[in-house]
Amino acid sequence: MKLLFIQSDPFTWTGKMSISAVLKKAGHDCDLLIEPAEKNLIESIKKINPDIIGISATTGAHLWALEKAKEIKEQLKLPVIFGGAHATFFPEVINDKNVDIICRGEGEYPTLELLDCMAQKKDITKIKNLWVKEGGKIHKNEIMPLIQDLDSLPFPDREIYYKYDFLRSQKSKDFIFMRGCPYNCSFCYNHSFRKLHGEKEKYVRYKSVNRAIEEILYVKNKWGMKNMMTFDEAMFINKEWLFSFLEQYKKQVNLPFICEARANLLDEETVRRLKEADCTCVRIGVETGSNSLRNDVLNKNLTNEQIENAARLLKKEKILLETYNMIGLPRETLEDAFETLRFNKKIRADYAWCALFQPYPGTDLANLAIREGFLDKDFMENFEPSFLTSTPMKLEHKKEIINLQKFFAMAVRFPIIIPFLKLLIKAPNNKFYDLIFRAGYIYLTLKTTDIGFIGLYKLGRLTGNYFKRKKQKNN
């Protein structure tokens, strides 16, 4: 049997690669298409001739997913399975006439069992993690236990992505070495996912250090890479694992790398070991410059003082600092948003990434926003797929917040423009400010990563094509 993933964005996703690897190991086939990289998606699907279409989507991207499912059902009559965060927390999406199956939670073994049953023409309605629409009835199955032994999984199948030159040729390759997060940030689905599985299961799980190193070396030797990126900020909780990994990474891989970390987990010894292993950049979540917003609203359990200390340690070791920020939060004033900007300037962030807050339905923060009148209950019906374009939040200074986001990163890097911002952001939202944001994104991304101008251009062009198509569709 052959599963074909389709997606709207030009990025690699470990979940799809892991599912593909498990399927191929069992004798099935799997492939993937990135819509903006294809001249005609339907024709490309026909050439691959799959037995089933898989679409993994977050909330927001689910609108694109439903649109594509409709086209596929009308033109190709293929079964469609939805996975990812939206299907996991909004399984009611199966009520859409173009969705046949949804997968809630981890997808490797439910998808494998599904294809096995399809190949053998067996009943598919009793597979754990799946909701299956059949004979006018929706069969809702319980959640299977989390995969505890991550080493038992084959290496993620990068072949499905690396058939695209713009991904294969990137100097940086990204990796995930763990699953789960122990924190309860109100804007994130993690706490909901943990509740879905209950307290009895071990939620935070790691690959062994040896397995992680083997995977990096496999990718390095097969496709080449000049640096490594990992998005496992919670790996800093387990210092024994982390220090062993850094030691082996330096000995066996010996390439520059970028990682993510929570500020409170960065102490002097940890930062020193990062430097010794050739870490060039650390990304931390600041979110907001307001202690009360970060802790009372976002539930980050993280203070400005802890972030300042982490920044000081990174600067001492000459490791670049990249920060994640959001503006347009519930209860946030325009002055709070400016305080976030000033705080990033204070800690001397090399790249202060800033997004417009996008409330994900079902999270604690979205529920708070609805209760307090910042958000309409039906906001998901017109949900923006990008946190860089707009926000459904009902804000007193929405125009100014959207404009400030465009200038944010450049203002932190070049604070000489800060005194002019309060005047500049009073202008109507406009394309020129969008260009300023893109220019800043290009400059600062090139400064803090090794993606290269050509690689960045290719990704930017494909991402732009997707939003351009969406805009044309909406018009």
Image (cartoon, rainbow, N blue to C red):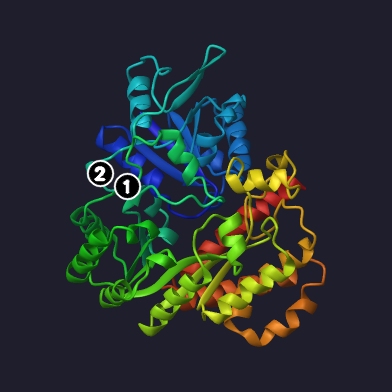
Which one is closest to the eye, mark 2 or mark 1? 2
The type of residue carrying mark 2 is Pro
Q: Residue farthest to the top?
A: 135
Q: Residue farthest to the bottom?
A: 416
When the figure is inspected, residue 131 is found, relative to residue 214, above or below; the finding is above
Give whichever of 406, 119 is nearer the camera. 406
Q: Quadrant of residue 64?
A: top right
Question: Is residue 170 something one can see in this rendering?
Answer: no
Dot 1 corresponds to which residue? Answer: 157
Dot 2 corresponds to which residue? Answer: 154
The type of residue carrying mark 1 is Asp
Give whichever of 419, 61 is nearer the camera. 419
Residue 15, position in %: x, y? 40, 45
Residue 9, position in %: x, y? 53, 52
Question: How would you rate the neighbour count of disc 2 (Cα within 10 Å): few for under 14, some for 14-19, many for 20 or more?
Answer: some
Q: Residue at x 69, y 82 (%)?
A: 418
Left or right of residue 410, residue 228 in this image: left
- In the image, which disc is placed on residue 39? none
